[in-house]
């Protein structure tokens, strides 16, 4: 079913439809990479905060 829709889009609109899908896919990949970096930075900041709190004197 999905393959039929894709082939029909390519037949009707030519390479433009493929270009749009490719650009959407690349945008999705960039979003995922950005989210991975933000998540990693959050983890590092959390660890640093924990280390600093452990070393600060209580009082």
Image: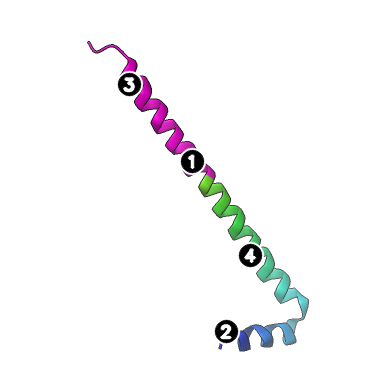
Above or below for 42 versus 15: above
Real-space CA distance between mark 1 and mark 3, rounded to the nearest whole angstrom: 20 Å
Part of the protein shown in magenta: 37-59
Query: In which quarter of the view is residue 19 placed?
Result: bottom right
Residue 4 percent across, percent down from the top left: 62, 89
Q: Earlier in the sequence, mark 4 or mark 1?
A: 4
- Which label was assigned to residue 28? none
Q: Which residue is mark 4?
A: 24
Real-space CA distance between mark 4 and mark 1, rounded to the nearest whole angstrom: 24 Å
Residue 31 percent across, percent down from the top left: 57, 53
Query: In which quarter of the view is residue 49 placed?
Result: top left
Above or below for 12 versus 31: below
Marks 4/2 in contact by CB < 8 Å: the verdict is no
Q: Earlier in the sequence, mark 4 or mark 3?
A: 4
Q: Which residue is mark 1?
A: 40
The residue located at (22%, 10%) in the rendering is: 59
Judged from the image, the secondary structure of the residue bearing numbered disc 4 is helix
Q: Earlier in the sequence, mark 1 or mark 2?
A: 2
């Amino acid at each position: 079913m999905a393959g039929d829709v894709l082939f029909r889009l390519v037949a009707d609109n030519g390479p433009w439809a493929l270009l749009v899908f490719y650009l959407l896919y690349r945008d999705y990949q960039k979003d995922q990479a950005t989210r991975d970096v933000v998540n990693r930075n959050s983890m590092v900041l959390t660890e640093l905060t924990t280390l600093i709190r452990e070393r600060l004197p209580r009082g």
